[in-house]
Image (tube, helix red, strand yellow):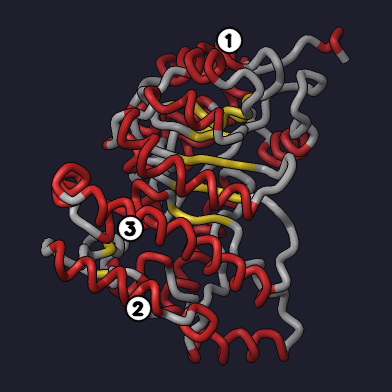
Amino acid sequence: MAIIEPEFMELTRSLDVAAWWEENDRCQTVSPDKPRCPASFSPDDHWIFEFMAVPSTLRYYQDTDYRNALHRDVNAITREYVGRAFFDEDTWRTSPKRIENLFGSEFGYHEGSTPWLMPVTDDPAEFGRVLDRAEATDLRTWSLPRDYLAEWEARKSTGEALPKLGTGSRGPATIMTSILKPEVLFLWFYDYPDLMRRFRDLLAAKMVEFNTILREFSGNSEPGWWITDDNCALFNRKLYREYCYPVLEQVLAAMTPGDARRYQHSDSAMGHLLEMQYALGIRSVNYGPTVDAGLIREKMPDAVINGQLPPFLLRDGSPEAIRQRVVADFQKAGATGLLNVTTAGSLAAGTGVGRMRWFMQVVQDDCRYDPRRR
């Protein structure tokens, strides 16, 4: 049974969702010369599981037909109440390799949770051998498994539009803390710095090589890069500068020449890293809910801020508390037109379509620009 909050449905009786999205499409310019701030949602698999009370997360990941049917059901509900579908109804059965796989990290699947990349070792000597194997791997034969190539060709033969690959990746902090347990990683930064510097440098080089292969294979000539790096909050400024910054610097130089889009998402409290993010040329951001919109605007004056509504506030807060936070963020960061109102991170599991509608109503009413400026 989907989550449809009666109180919020009553508050939004007059909301015309079709008109809301039509206006939202006209609000995408990065200037105040538009009716209001644009807004967006980012529901994901966590959100689906609670929204639809999914009985088996394992089946969702392992049964493509079941996953597609569930996506169709969810999309039908969100189209009715929110005016948009958010999920692919023809998901792929296969996928390319991931950069974490190159270093021996594979997904573990457990009922009741999302897939989790498993650490490879806590033995530094063994990890040295892991790096040897990664360095010696021929990525052109490794990156695209046979089953994926077969599905690609089958879809291509029907004239289906095929995805552009090599568009983004998890960031180095989260990659590193998947391949190694976080506590192991941080101890080794001090105990085995040469090993960790080798890991850093090999990761940077292989990320560029791997994603170049994906781009060439899929015919993706569009520059730009997205980064999802929740675990960068674990790094202090010194360690981030030494181990993460050089990886991003090399990857972004290769994937985002000129003024191509550089986007960073992190659910975490990473306000201490904003100057380095800005120095990397990142100009579109979605940071965690404890990172104040005013601080982001101060440190990143020309960045598009995607946020900063706390996801749990939208899920659990009163209508007025939600309104006050949206208005406060608009006042702090929206004046130049470089704000997209959304949650600071993904839409929290347990958020229903009534609260999504209230969010839309608040943005429509309280995030408008002065028409005299247009």
**Of residues 174 and 290, which is closer to you in this image?**
174
Question: Is label 1 in a helix, a strand or a loop?
Answer: helix
* Among numbered discs 3 and 2, the one appearing first in the sequence: 2
Q: Is residue 118 visible?
A: yes
Q: Tell me the CA gap for discs 3 and 1.
A: 43 Å
x and y percentages locating residue 292 in the rendered image? 43, 18
Residue at the spot of label 2 = 62
**Pointers 3 and 1 in contact (C-beta within 8 Å):** no
Relative placement, left or right, of 362 versus 35 is: left
Are there few (<14), some (14-19), or many (20+) residues within 10 Å of tag 1?
few
Residue occupying the point 58% across, 43% down: 82
x and y percentages locating residue 73 in the rendered image? 49, 64
Residue occupying the point 73% across, 72% down: 219
* Among numbered discs 2 and 1, the one appearing first in the sequence: 2
Q: Quadrant of the N terminus?
A: bottom left
Residue 121 drawn above or below residue 333: below
On residue 331, the disc is 1
Q: Residue furthest front?
A: 194
Question: Is label 2 in a helix, a strand or a loop?
Answer: helix
Residue at the spot of label 3 = 199
Are there few (<14), some (14-19), or many (20+) residues within 10 Å of tag 2?
few
